[in-house]
Image (cartoon, helix red, strand yellow):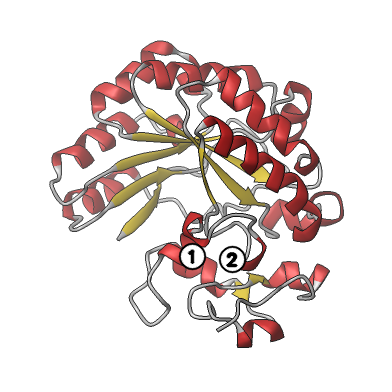
Amino acid sequence: MNVLLRITDQCNQDCCFCNVSSDESVPLDEAMRRVRQAKDLRTLSISGGEPTLNKGLLELVREAKKNPGIQFVSLQTNAVTAASSDYARMLKEAGLDEAFVALHSHQEKLSNVLTGSQLWQKTVSGIQNLTAAGIKVVINTVINKATYEQLPEFCLFVGRTFPDVKEICFSFIQPHGRAWKNRSALIPRYSEVVPFLKKALEFCDGCGIAYCNPYCGFPLCLFPAPKKCSSEFLDSPRSSSEKEGVSLVKRDKVQGPACQHCAEKTRCNGVWKKYAEIHGFSELKPFKK
């Protein structure tokens, strides 16, 4: 089982597509209690807001690594704080296994517009410091109308700038929160994105970068790669116990008419309900049974 633990709702960026609710975080003492009592966790993901703004983060990571019931500790971050090489080193010394780093464009100006900050260069430096400290880095990019045509160039930038980064997660903008308010400017059709994403994945294949279609990504039938690259396909069917956090994603998604005849109906959750309000279900292509 995987667990997501939000330890702050504060952030040093102001992303125009942020969908995190301010009431999802827990106080540090409660986070500590959950970490100490955790059993049989494959991955503990620590998130926010921006979790590095919580002064107790290092202590929490150390506590998680003491617990034999937690196999792997991941940090969801924009890596800005890790622009300090000392902080990146302290994360490593605390025992952090992985940093899941948000980087939404290879273009500094566009990234700063999307994140409502002037912190792109610090994120780049943070990624470099994390890999130099020996922490595995997975880059997460949120695909939206402003960035999807640049996906091949984005992957080229990642390959050249971060040679130790060997995985990219291709999230699709969630139509909630600020993203919903800015939907006309931000939320493309899946089918518009696919040709550019396909070229990006071909580049990744050619240079040894793995990739992931996460729960907040594409329906299985539209992600232009083998199904084994999609989190929904690798997860257990709906009849099994669901992972904390993932169940919330599933409740916010809906299957279309074509999905009723799909061989992967029990694994794929379809599209975001709000996405269907905008673009409908016509893009979905069921797998044959």
The quadrant in which the C terminus is found is bottom right
**Marks 2/1: CA–CA distance:** 8 Å
Report the number of discs: 2
Whether residue 116 is visible: no
Whether residue 72 is visible: yes
What residue is shown at x 78% (from left), y 23% (from top)? 109
Categorize mark 2 by other alpha carbons within 10 Å: few (<14), some (14-19), many (20+).
many
For the residues bearing labels 2 and 1, Cβ distance under 8 angstroms: yes
The quadrant in which the N terminus is found is bottom left
What residue is shown at x 47% (from left), y 58% (from top)? 228
In the depicted structure, whether residue 249 falls above or below residue 201:
below
Q: In the image, which disc is placed on residue 146? A: none
Amino acid on which disc 1 is placed? Glu
What residue is shown at x 24% (from left), y 30% (from top)? 95
Residue sitting farthest toward the front: 206
In the depicted structure, whether residue 220 falls above or below residue 157:
below
